Image (cartoon, rainbow, N blue to C red):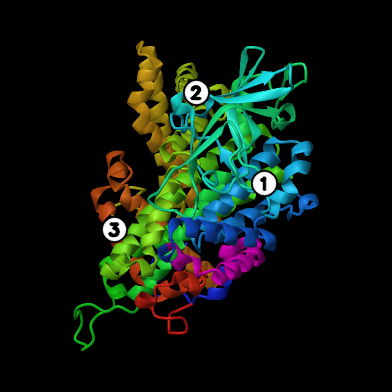
Amino acid sequence: MAQENADQAPNVDVEALALLLDGDHHRVRTEVRETMAEYASVLTDAEEMSRDDFRERVREVVVEIARSGQAGYGFPEEYGGGGDIGASIAAFETLGFGDLSVMVKVGVQFGLFGGAILQLGTKRHHDAYLADLIKGELLGCFAMTETGHGSNVQHLGTVATYDPATSEFVITTREPDASKDYIGNAARHARLAVVFAQLEVGGERHGVHALVVPLRDEGGQVVPSVRIEDDGLKMGLNGVDNGRIWFDGVRVPRENLLNHFADVTEDGEYTSDIESPNRRFFTMLGTLVQGRVCVGGAGIAASKVALTIAIEYALRRRQFEATDEEQEELLLDYGLHQRRLFPLLARTYALSFAQEVLAGQLHGVFSGTISDEESRRRLESRAAGTKAFGTWHATRTIQECREACGGAGYLAENRFTALKADTDVFATFEGDNHVLLQLVAKGLLTDYASDFEDLDQLGTVRFVAGLAVDTVLERTRVRQLLEGVRDVLPGGDSDDTDAGLLNSDYHRALYTFREEHLLGAVARRLKRGVDEGMNPGEVFSRVQDHVIAAARAHVERLVLEAFLDKVDEQPEGDLKDTLSLVCDLFALSGIEADRAWFIEHGRLTVQRSKAITREVGDLCRRVRPIARDLVAAFDVPRELLRADALIGPAGEAGAR
């Protein structure tokens, strides 16, 4: 990592850094940037048009993007797609630089609706729908969430009953809280819906399955036995027509069942190669993991927009006299301003590289190069954790950047109004972040066991309680790491000096220790509670805060390792030095943020904790001369920043 005594900022090759951030799909990202810059006027349309007009404007832009081919990268080439899931994710993330209603509507149409037909359907569905869907000529929606059932998808109330007399499924909303809700595209534009419902055949329930159900005819009129209401004005994303749907005995042909994992014969026999209903359900949902990957990436992209505006503003805005010079001081020269923005900037870089690792793994699964079950489960877990971190980071970063721009940041013309409002929902769609972290913890506690999908929360408690705690985690790995760190620190890992603070092995060891200590504590508490005769549900409730803490620590360690690996891949030179500096800031600011825990658990002395705080301040001062270059490498099109009052019009110094 960076040399401890180095006080000079590296020279930054902005173009090389931008290429590194773009990864393997630089061409795709460039094309999408150009498209979004072309439609930059949508950002002002959102403020000036009526809601109905703006929805139509967003639809028009989405259809134009579809016609360009930029929304279809992830679909098979034989239907007009690009056959590249990695390119699809890169394109979607880059849409996050522009109007987020456009991005979300693209996600609903091509990621959720199209992805469900592609992944859950078979050739008959692909032939019937994909070509028109990819071109934007057939709009649809993804009808999973219900008013009474959000994250608890297994217990949805909508029912699809098979009628062998007509070879049809009858879709019914049986309970008041079983209406589909918050469904994007439903209120205005969707002609079809992929509807998730309890499948009932011959009086027997077989769990949640997906069916293609018509909502509107070609003229846009809602079909009989379907009722749709508009969800109305939302906190943000008002260019997306979210709605509620009720089904009153809607009949669809047997062939409308998306039958990749299960089918029903004409005479009413249910068949599936996956015997366990729970495993079948989680396997089905696992194929839709792309949505979580994309939402996390979109949150990171929105953070890049906010940081670009805030840092460019801080390089122009002066406030108070801090020196003997006549001019007031630039905001970014104040230590507090650096402390507010630069750790968030470093974290954005870290999450970008973690997202790149995740997207690569997803591409491997869909391309068939990664096919074993454990790798698939680990991918699902990593997607859940990275989505939670990416979207929480967006919420925190956008707010801090808004405040860092003072009153000017409160004006709609300077972009933060829309960024705050439109990204707020990211923390709860494609899975509530706290629920997703429980999924991460379940995988860790059970070590992605063969019956992983069969375990709900209570099943996880019982599973862990039946193990010796030593089988839940292997502590020698972290002990070896910590022993290795002592070799490079004069007085050990709790030394009172500043030595070794910028050693990457030290960072890795602390992050790993925290993860495995928390995981072991959760396992012991679960086991102790059950051994003492407590109800498993009560045991889980009491340990839930520790469960989330262990999952957070795990994801944090994955993010750090993704950054460290990216640094290690670079040849010696300015680019590596730049990344090393930013990675050091990410690692140490993370330790500083949780220093109370590390002190409580004997990994830091008070003196060393203070040394870390001093080092973070030093790192921020070293980042200051290259801050503009670091945000310039995000390559957010100037047209999408707007914010002329904050950072000046395009063409002025600092604008990009």
Horizontal and vertical percent position of residue 158: 54, 26
Q: Which residue matches tag 3?
A: 613
Cα distance between the residues tagged 2 and 1:
42 Å
Cα distance between the residues tagged 3 and 1:
63 Å
**Which badge, 2 or 3, is on the more N-terminal residue?**
2
**Which badge, 3 or 1, is on the more N-terminal residue?**
1
Q: Amino acid at mark 3?
A: Thr
Q: Is residue 359 visible?
A: yes
- Magenta span: 20-46
Q: Amino acid at mark 1?
A: Glu
Q: Amino acid at mark 2?
A: Asp
Left or right: where does residue 354 sit relative to residue 587?
Answer: right
Q: Relative to the observer, which residue lies in front, 1 or 43?
A: 43
For disc 3, the neighbor class at 10 Å (few under 14, some 14 to 19, many from 20) is some
Q: Which mark is residue 589?
A: none
Q: Which residue matches tag 1?
A: 218
Q: What residue do we see at 51% from left, 38% from top? A: 228
Left or right: where does residue 393 sit relative to residue 358?
Answer: left
Cα distance between the residues tagged 2 and 3:
41 Å
Q: Is residue 474 visible?
A: no
Q: Which mark is residue 456?
A: 2
Q: Relative to the observer, which residue lies in front, 148 or 513?
A: 148
For disc 2, the neighbor class at 10 Å (few under 14, some 14 to 19, many from 20) is few
Horizontal and vertical percent position of residue 237: 45, 53
Q: Relative to the observer, which residue lies in front, 596 or 259?
A: 259
State which mark lies toward you, 2 or 1: 1
Does the magenta portion include 32?
A: yes
In the displayed structure, would residue 533 be above or below residue 367?
A: above
Horizontal and vertical percent position of residue 553: 42, 42
